[in-house]
Amino acid sequence: MRAMVLEAIGGPLLAVERPLPLPRAGEIRIRIEACAVCRTDLHVIDGDLPQPKLPLIPGHEIVGIVEAVGGDVDAIRIGHRVGVPWLGHTCRTCSYCRSNAENLCDDPLFTGYTRDGGFATHAIADADYAFDLDLEADAVSVAPLLCAGLIGWRSLKRAGDGRKVGIYGFGAAAHIIAQVCIWQGRKVYAFTRPDDAAAKRFALELGVTWAGGSDEPAPDPLDAAIIFAPVGSLVPLALKAVRKAGRVVCAGIHMSDIPAMPYAVLWGERELVSVANLTRQDAREFFAVAKQAGVRTHTTVYPLENANTALADLRAGRVSGAAVLVP
């Protein structure tokens, strides 16, 4: 198999050849059709997230075909298309797993972080954490749903039922969940980098109510705001933008430090919450909603060997929608 491998934190990914892996009990081997590139991949590669498995194949938005199964896995799954997300395995015994909060598991494995991921031609996955997908769907279009879509959905659930939703950072997750919000009849207010005219145009083309720089005040008091950008200084701005009893959701796995802010920004029963990982129930809910809403992902395709270029483009803000690697 071919893979793009991280040998050292901060270094480039290296193209390597490896023997085809064999699935163990409870596992499947997937022939990868597409793997989207996520900002979390940057956090892993840059060392923002501690103690990744090294050497490591990054990537956690995998779409592919099951071509082999290990013990305890029904062979009927061979030939099925599946999707593999960030949460790749849980212990199933800790208090969180036993209380329907497997996203907070005390002993998890994360795809493309603590186990090898999808920047490759093949991957091994836990069979119970690989979701069956439509064989007729376009693999490239589906791949961003496996993280950008799922985290966006969990963040929207945490944001509540408010009708006016602000989104800070208009990238892969935002462009997906904005479509869901609009389908639900909500108004979306998109906050982009102040100098990013292309992102503003992209948001408006998707049908948002308003698009402007993150340094601009919201034109209306927001019921809730979701922060996808990993920028802590956006937190007090979002709190100022939401109404009394409004909620701000921090959706990223990593964020720069939140600056000191006056208590008055939080007062008025405003809430600040975070989202951590996802559950399999999130996936079951979201894939159904995405189909009903007619969500269309906007993608830029890169050959697998150009993974470093895709990561550089994502880091520089040159990707509109989602970047996707194709073996």
Image (tube, helix red, strand yellow):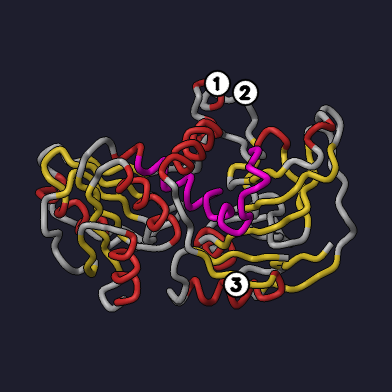
Q: Please tell me whether mark 2 sits on a helix, a strand or a loop.
A: loop
Q: At which x and y percent is residue 286?
A: 47, 39
Checking the image for residue 93, the label placed there is 2
Q: At which x and y percent is residue 149?
A: 47, 49
In the image, what residue occupies the spot 50% across and 43% down? 277
In the image, what residue occupies the spot 66% across and 76% down? 306
Whether 312 is drawn above or below 33: the answer is below
Give the extent of the magenta segment: 131-156
Query: How far separated are the C-alphas under marks 2 and 1?
Result: 6 Å
Upstream in sequence: badge 2 or badge 1: 2
Q: Residues within 10 Å of mark 1 (few under 14, many from 20)?
A: few
Q: Quadrant of the N terminus?
A: bottom right
Q: Quadrant of residue 245?
A: top left
Of the residues shown, which amino acid type is indicated by label 3? Gly
Of the residues shown, which amino acid type is indicated by label 2? Thr
**Circle count:** 3
